[in-house]
Image: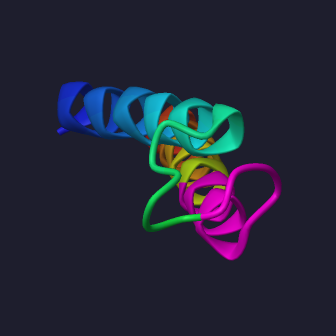
């Protein structure tokens, strides 16, 4: 599951970059759009979940 989370986070970061530089310009405005912030929030959630899970696993071991 951690590999899937890492790949998902990497994909979200790639989409964030592409939306920031304007690769999706006909449908999404470039820059700090709500789409960019949604991807950033999702990536941050993945990072926080992995940190919480790692800390919980260390406490039980």
Q: Classify residue 14 as left or right of residue 17.
A: left
Identify the main secondary structure in magenta: helix
Q: Is residue 35 visible?
A: yes
Residue at 35% over, 33% down: 11
In the image, is 25 to the left or to the right of 2? Answer: right
Q: Position of residue 25 (x, y in %)?
A: 53, 52
In the foreground, 6 or 54: 6
Residue 38 is left or right of residue 24, and the answer is right
At 31% from the left and 39% from the top, the residue drawn is 8
Task: Describe the colour scheme in one phrase.
Answer: rainbow
Rendered location of residue 10, percent (x, y): 42, 27
Residue at (53, 33) in percent of width and height: 18
User: Residue 55 at what x, y percent from top left?
Assistant: 61, 40
Q: Which picture quadrant has residue 3?
A: top left
Quadrant for the C terminus, please. Answer: top left
In-image side of 20 versus 42 (left or right):
right
Please give the range of residues in magenta. 29-42
Q: Residue furthest right?
A: 32
Asked whether residue 61 appears in the rendered view, the answer is no
């Amino acid at each position: 599951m951690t590999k899937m989370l890492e790949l998902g986070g990497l994909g979200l970061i790639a989409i964030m970059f592409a939306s920031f530089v304007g690769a999706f310009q006909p449908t999404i405005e470039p820059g700090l759009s709500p789409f960019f912030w949604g991807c950033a929030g999702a990536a941050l959630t993945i990072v926080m979940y992995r940190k919480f899970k790692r800390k919980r696993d260390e406490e039980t071991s």
